[in-house]
Amino acid sequence: MSWISLLSENPFYEFAIILFFAALLGGLGQILKQPLIVMFIALGILVGPAVLDVVKSKDNIHLLSEIGIAILLFIVGLKLDLRIIKSVGRIALLTGLGQVLFTSLIGYFIGIGLGFSSLHSFYIAVALTFSSTIIIVKLLTDKKEIDSLHGQIAIGFLIVQDIVVILVMIVLSTIGKQQDTHIMQEIITTAVSGLILIILTIIMMRYVLPKISFFLAKSIEMLTLFAVAWAVTLAMAGDLMGFSREVGAFLAGVSLASSQFKDVISSRMASLRDFLLLFFFVNLGINLNLNVIGQQVPEALIFSVFVLVGNPLIVLIIMGIMGYRKRTSFLAGLTVAQISEFSLIFVGLGLAVGHINDEIVGLITLVGLITIGLSTYLILYSHQIYDFISPALKIFQRKIPYRELNYKLEIPSNFDIIIFGLGRFGGNIADMLDHNPEISYLAVDFDPEIVKQNKEKGRTIIYGELDDPEIIEQIPLEKTKCIISTVRDSDASMKLIRSLKRNNYKGKIYLTALNEKDIEMMTPCGADEILFPQQMAATNFYNSVIVNLIDKDDSVFKCG
């Protein structure tokens, strides 16, 4: 350990050691299927004074952590797509605000019951409210559920949460800037400064930024550099005008949210965000007092159970009352079963203004480690968990879940073909079937937007997910000759096969594979054929183009 301490006296060696352990723990996190947030907090503890005592350049680490938070808020603003909230109606707003309200209220009284002061209980309750948009989007994307109904609803109320946390941080930063000024005077000053900053941002967004970004887009590197500079500059402006740096960075992201280059900027800056946030969590970890955290374990476990169980229950109840199926409510509810990186930033601000102490920061950090770690597995295995506890969830569903009827059609009695998934592959199949009116087909898709678009085309389509057994029970299978699944998910395909067997389906079954490994896995399941679109496209191209070229002139492929 002494040689590590000796090496860390050189700032370059210090950062090399930190990055080495970051890569090591990041790889361990991949094996354990854990988000980087958990591993980076563990990294901070490892290189902190409690273990290896590597970090000597605390000012440098703190500066990089502040830039990382600014970039994080910039990307949140950049991805603030209010159309997502609009596309799922009132449910995103009502569920988001309802969950924030009830989680805060119940969390506050739990804090009071555990002996915390009113102010500390308030901070704890608010910190328990926010869920990690970054983690949820990553997990839903990996599971290919980001476009599903529960995925869209979840993203919708996570955006609502992000807006709420920004407002809370504005209020907190305003309080933090107060010194001897009167509270009313401070509020008025902040409101005026905020209005000026917003007006300047709108002017830049409308008249200046589109021209600059279009000019710089000739070079992706320059566009990325400009985005970073803009985020940090507006963060500085926000700080100078009486807000926090985070609010300024968030407005910088919002100002580019309508840009045609926002996806490019976001993808290029995501790696930079993750790299810089490493130092935020290292900064958090090195300042944690393990002795204090050890004393907070019982309270942390109580709050963690509340987040892991209570938050999903709140969403289940709200969505059930609003008329959604128990399955949709449950899958959406699991996305709030953890606290967010914003929760840690929030308590960090509370510590900076003197409202809370290290004990509360340690408590929330421990709750974060527990809930983020466990909720990752809950979401990864959400469908298996649902299948197990489904009978107990009936109380959270109305007799007629009328909301999801908006996504369904009255199903005629007979179909020749049923297609699951109308993406590119499934959509092309449907296009060809449309030219043969003698063949009737039913399409099933889990993306409400695709369902809406195909209804407008006059197609018979219903909303549903491939691995939802209730959908199979609703579809008339007696005279169906062929079922085609274009969904490239081996687990969902296996569930489809099992559901069809339970319902005594006798026709042909065609499944779609993502890769050769999936083909090997799905071959023994009982499907008549496994479709591999890439191979089919290559074979078709060879037969229709290459073979004709060879037939016409064998010399085509000869050199010279």
Image: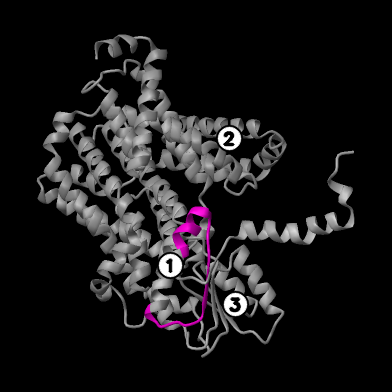
Above or below residue 289? Residue 530 is: below
Horizontal and vertical percent position of residue 66: 41, 29
Q: Which residue is mark 3?
A: 455
Above or below residue 105? Residue 233 is: above
**Alpha carbon of mark 2 to alpha carbon of mark 3: how far?**
40 Å
Above or below residue 59? Residue 183 is: below
Above or below residue 175? Residue 107 is: below
Which amino acid lies under the numbered mark 1 shown in the image of this protein?
Cys
Residue at figure coordinates x 21%, y 35% from the top left: 362
Q: Quadrant of the N terminus?
A: top left
Along the viewing direction, whichever of 442 and 363 lies nearer the viewer: 442
Horizontal and vertical percent position of residue 328: 38, 68
First reached walking from the N terminus: tag 1 or tag 3: 3
Q: Is residue 514 left or right of residue 340?
A: right
**Alpha carbon of mark 1 to alpha carbon of mark 2: how far?**
50 Å
Badge 3 element: helix
Horizontal and vertical percent position of residue 15: 40, 19
Horizontal and vertical percent position of residue 376: 33, 50
Q: Which residue is mark 2?
A: 227
Q: Residues within 10 Å of mark 3 (few under 14, many from 20)?
A: some
Which amino acid lies under the numbered mark 3 shown in the image of this protein?
Lys
Badge 2 element: helix
Asked where in the image residue 32 lies, by quadrant, the reply is top left
Q: Is residue 394 visible?
A: yes
Residue at figure coordinates x 37%, y 16% from the top left: 14
Q: What is the magenta range?
A: 502-523
Along the viewing direction, whichever of 457 and 288 lies nearer the viewer: 457
* Residue lying at the far bottom of the rendered structure: 413
Which amino acid lies under the numbered mark 2 shown in the image of this protein?
Ala
Q: Which residue is mark 1?
A: 525
